[in-house]
Every structure is written in C-alpha cells, then in structure tokens.
Image (cartoon, rainbow, N blue to C red):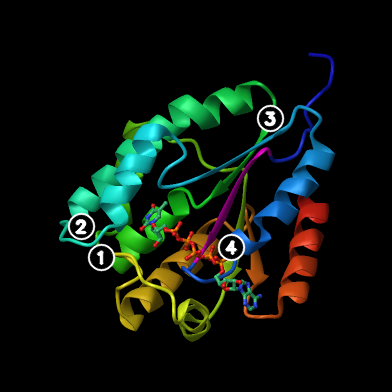
Amino acid sequence: MKSTPPDGPRFISLEGLDGSGKTTQIDRIVDFCEQRNPRGVVVTREPGGTEVGERIRHILLEHGSLHPQTELLLLFAARVQHIKAVVAPALALGKTVVCDRYLDATYAYQGHGRGLGAPLIDGLSELLAVPPPDLTLFFDVPVSVALGRRAGRSADRIEAEGEAFFERVREGYQTRVRAQPERFVVISAAKSLAEVALAVDAALAARL
Ligand code: T5A
C-alpha cells in the first residue's frame, strides 16, 4: 500500500453518558478522520463490534438481573473479541479506528457506577493486554440534560438505572479525565447541536 497513515492519533474513542450526544456526532468525526487518513477509517462500538460482541451486548442491555462482576466480565469478553478481530487488525493496516465507547466506559459505569472500583479493571486490562485509545472525546453533560434527551425513549437495563447511578458514572469519567488529561478532549455537550459540532471540529483539528 503506497499511502502513508498519519502520525497523529489513530485509535479514537467517544465517551459520555447515555444521551450525551456522542453518537449524533459520529458521522462528522468519521468524515474528518477519512480526510486525514488515506488508509481509511473503521467505525465500531462497544459493547459489540463483532458477531459475538453484539450477542453479549444483547445480554448486557436486555432486562434481567446480572451481578456487577458478571456484567464486568461480559464486557471484557466482548472487548477481547473486538480488539483481536477488529481494532488491532485495522490499526495494523494503518487505518483509523473510531470506537463509540471503550475502556473508559468500564471505569465510569462498572468502576464508579456499580462501585467495583478501578483496581479490578486495571488488573483485567493489564492481564488481557487491552490497548488504551490514543485520543478520547468525552462528551460531558449534566445528568439532567442526558436524562432529558432520553425522555420518551424506552430504556435498556443500564439506562433504567436512577439519577444517582449516572451522577457516579459522570464522576467516574471526570476522574479518568483528571488522571490522563493529555489523552482526553472534553466537549461541553449540553450546548446546541451546532455548537457541539464546532467544538468537535476544533478538537479534531487540534489533535489529528
Ligand atoms: N457500557 C458500555 C458499560 O456499562 N460499560 C462499558 O464498558 C461499555 C463499553 C451502551 C451501554 O453500555 C454501557 C453504557 C451504555 O449504557 P448504547 O445504546 O450504545 O448502550 O448507549 P449510548 O452509546 O449511550 O447511546 P445513546 O444513544 O443512549 O447515547 P448517545 O450516543 O450519547 O446520544 P445520542 O447521540 O444518541 O443522542 C441522544 C438524543 O439527544 C439528541 C439526539 O438527537 C438524540 O435524540 N441530541 C441533542 N439534542 C440537543 N442538543 C444536542 N447537542 C444534542 N445531541 C444529541
């Protein structure tokens, strides 16, 4: 292949509360990345991104009871398959990978939201050699805004959690940002669609 991949970040994750608006911006992000990388862009998501991962996603999001540790291990099972089958091969080919949710969601939702703590997630990530993303766009919104955007839509098992759970999740994300500020760009996502789009453009122009 003659084209050269860009030097900048190629493994990009999008994070935020359910209803933060990250998925709404994904096409814009992908367009931007496609212009930067002649080798192409793979768009994917977690949990999911592979056939088995999508089946695990269904178990995770359908209603019913799951112990928090079971939830965590299912997420990692889906993640390992996703890394081995999708993320690592795409990066090896010089492509950019845009992933709707990844490892930071586990720290935020399972570590903080469910109260499992970070050391267990650190340990599993190290044991399974989970690669960190190069760049993470965190779409930050107050919980009330996220809940308002989801109003009228049926909630899955995780979305059915109460406000206090999502406050902990948001704190979890903010803790991750404070710990690794160089990897994150925080987008103030409570603004209008047009303003958020401009913030996304500025973040990508500065970092890619
Ligand atoms: N999970 C995932 C874990 O618990 N641990 C993990 O490790 C991982 C990887 C995934 C669930 O799995 C959990 C977290 C999640 O609960 P999902 O369906 O993929 O489930 O959930 P989300 O990725 O959160 O998808 P959502 O659609 O719920 O949220 P988004 O992507 O943040 O929001 P979006 O873009 O769909 O927008 C929501 C609504 O708001 C409007 C949109 O039009 C849409 O109607 N909107 C705006 N309105 C006004 N102003 C703006 N700026 C707006 N932006 C969007």
Q: Which residue is identified by label 3?
A: 95
Crowding at dot 2, Cα within 10 Å, few <14 / some 14-19 / many 20+, comes out as some
Kindly identify which numbered label has been placed on residue 66.
none
Tell me the kind of residue under disc 1: Gly
Earlier along the polypeptide chain: callout 2 or callout 3?
A: 2
Residue hosting label 2: 68
Quadrant of the image containing the N terminus: top right
Residue 75 located left or right of residue 186: left
Residue 65 on the magenta span: no
| Location of mark 1 (residue) | 115
Compared across the picture, whether 100 is left or right of 186 comes to left
Out of 28 and 124, give the one closest to the viewer.
Answer: 28
Q: Is residue 23 above or below residue 174?
A: above
Span shown in magenta: 10-16
What percent of the width, then of the height, locates residue 138? Answer: 58, 63
Tell me which label, 3 or 1, sits earlier in the chain: 3
Residue 79 in the image: state x and y as whole percent: 39, 38
- Left of 30 or right of it: where is 163? left
The amino acid type found where label 4 is placed reads Phe
Question: Pointer 3 and pointer 4: residues touching (CB < 8 Å)?
Answer: no
